[in-house]
Image: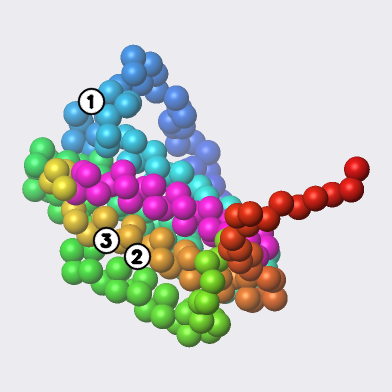
Amino acid sequence: MMSSEAAISEAQSSAPRSKIYTRTGDKGTSALYTGERRPKTDVIFEALGTTDELSSNLGLALTYCEEAGNGLTDKLLKIQCLLQDIGSNVATPRGNANQARLARTEFDSAGALTSELERWIDELDAQLPPLKNFILPSGGRASSALHVARSVCRRAERRVVPLVQEGFADESTGKYLNRLSDFLFAAARYAAKFENRTEGIYRKYEGRVEVRPT
């Protein structure tokens, strides 16, 4: 008798494979979740591309955090999944979709996910020394990768907020990205502290010229 694992494996191997490429975008357009096709340069695709870029950077940061064992990986993985949900919301213009699609792509209407980020920020910040200087992106691989993700998150917010203002995306998407950049800042500082790494501090160099002997 075939085991359940073998049956699943056989079913998977016999299932038709979908191609990675579709050729549907060869003329410079792409489809939204509503089925509407727009130029790839459309502001919606710019926002989607930036949230995707953010998720990719979080994947790198997650790898470094996993190597360091700093306990941030589960949070980062959840955030990556939520960024997919934000993408679904952005890809479904609120004024052009039917009720079924609107309901399926609604994001954090009660604000619980944003509140969760705030709790995470408070938990991390309670373990950090108070800020007395401007912190430069630094502090080891995990910390630096989180700082990169933070800066990309700021750009993602700048791309999504105009869509919120136009009524294309839920207001909660912009709020979540705003709080996410704060979380990533706190997480970067925490990652540096966890590894006993020194964070770079801004210093004013105006009028100071380093002279080296020739």
> Quick one: label 2, few (<14), some, or many (20+) residues within 10 Å?
many
Above or below, comparing residue 182 to residue 21 in the picture: below
What is the quadrant of the C terminus in the image? top right
Q: Are marks 2 and 1 in contact (CB under 8 Å)?
A: no
Q: Are marks 3 and 2 in contact (CB under 8 Å)?
A: yes
Q: Which residue is mark 1?
A: 37
Q: Position of residue 83 (x, y in %)?
A: 37, 53
**Span colored in magenta:** 137-164
Quarter of the image where one finds residue 183 = bottom left
Quarter of the image where one finds residue 120 = bottom left
Q: Is residue 45 visible?
A: yes
* Name of the residue lying farthest toward the top: 27
Above or below, comparing residue 48 to residue 27 in the picture: below
For badge 1, the amino acid type reads Arg
For badge 3, the amino acid type reads Lys
Q: How many marks?
A: 3
Q: Position of residue 162 (x, y in %)?
A: 22, 44
Above or below, comparing residue 37 to residue 105 in the picture: above
Q: Secondary structure at mark 2?
A: helix
Q: Which residue is mark 2?
A: 179
Residue ID at (51%, 77%): 131
Marks 2 and 1 sit apart, C-alpha to C-alpha, by 31 Å
Q: Position of residue 45 (x, y in %)?
A: 32, 34
Marks 3 and 1 sit apart, C-alpha to C-alpha, by 27 Å
> Quick one: label 1, few (<14), some, or many (20+) residues within 10 Å?
few
What is the quadrant of the N terminus in the image? bottom right
Closer to the N terminus: mark 3 or mark 1?
Answer: 1
**Relative to 149, is 202 on the left or the right?**
right
Q: Main secondary structure of the magenta part?
A: helix
User: Which mark, residue 175?
Assistant: 3
